[in-house]
Image (cartoon, rainbow, N blue to C red):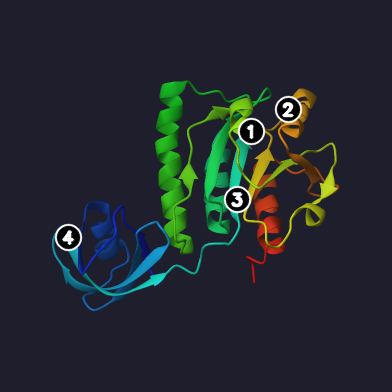
Amino acid sequence: MQKLFLDYTPENRIILDGEQARHIAKSLRMRVGDMLTVTDGKGSDFGCQIDEIGKNTVTLTVCYKQASDSEPSCKVTIYQGVPKGSKLEDIIQKCTELGAVRIVPTLTKRCVSRPDEKGARRKNERYRKIALEAAQQSGRGIVPEISEQMALKEAVQNDESELKILFYEGGGERLKSLVRSDVQSVSVYIGPEGGFDEAEVELLRENGAQVATLGRRILRTQTAPVAALSAIMLLTDNMN
């Protein structure tokens, strides 16, 4: 069932306008009487019936409310070394589909892309739109938080996840030896195109990160977070 996100918790009736109304009427070609799901972005889904399709608005009646069953039990945050070009857009889209709750563009020593504050803010607006669209398409119960970019040191020192994992081409532990099925929160650290330097690896270790490997092959920066997140979802029983 088609899902849309609201920035409030609905009651009995919902009036959609703007892009959401156009999406329902023009893109999806839905009709009066059709059902769709809206979510408040806090883990609750609302089954709704279309009552009226006007020129600029769509009116819905809330038929039932239920907890979203699409959110994983393990909350995964991706700290992604800022890559070049549009790679971060693909990372955000795929990690949203796979169940990440937060994605943090992270500045490391080997990051080539270093947008200024204004440029970073503009990009972040686009990143949030991509996350919203991916969350709607994949039926998520929340839209992942897309944080403002931050330095690696700030990121790890403020990281309160139960388990911190650094993926490093220099080798490390096998994931299944680190990730328990009942772990509640995991942080994943992925380097940019050039990877992490040794000082950054030591910084992460000093702040409690475990070094892990994704196998004998070296993955691209846009491939690694998708592979890591998929493996973590499998090991925590969130892909069954």
Q: Disc 3 on helix, strand or loop? A: strand
Residue occupying image coordinates x 28% and y 64%: 24
Q: Which mark is residue 76?
A: 3
| Residue 83 in view, yes or no | no
Of discs 2 and 4, which sits in the foreground? 2
Which amino acid is tagged 2?
A: Leu
Q: Secondary structure at mark 2?
A: helix
**Residue underneath mark 2:** 203
Say whether residue 70 is visible.
Answer: yes
Q: Is residue 149 above or below residue 135?
A: above
Q: Which residue is mark 4?
A: 57
Looking at the picture, tell me which residue is in the foreground, 105 or 115.
Answer: 105
SS state under label 4: strand
Quarter residue 236 falls in: bottom right
CB atoms at circles 2 and 4 under 8 Å apart? no
Q: Answer with mark 4 or mark 1, whichever residue precedes in sequence.
A: 4
The amino acid sitting under disc 4 is Thr
Residue 192, position as x, y percentages in the image:
67, 33
Q: Nearer the viewer, mark 4 or mark 3?
A: 3
Question: Residues under labels 2 and 4: Cα distance?
Answer: 52 Å
The answer to whether 240 is drawn above or below residue 196 in the figure is below
**In this rendering, would 66 be left or right of 13?**
right
Q: Amino acid at mark 3?
A: Val
Measure the alpha-carbon separation of dots 2 and 1.
8 Å
First along the sequence among labels 4 and 3: 4
Q: Residue 181: where, in percent of width, then height?
A: 71, 62
Callout 2 touching callout 1 (CB < 8 Å)? yes
Which residue is more in the foreground, 100 or 84?
Answer: 100
Q: Measure how far apart labels 3 and 1 are at the Cα level.
A: 14 Å
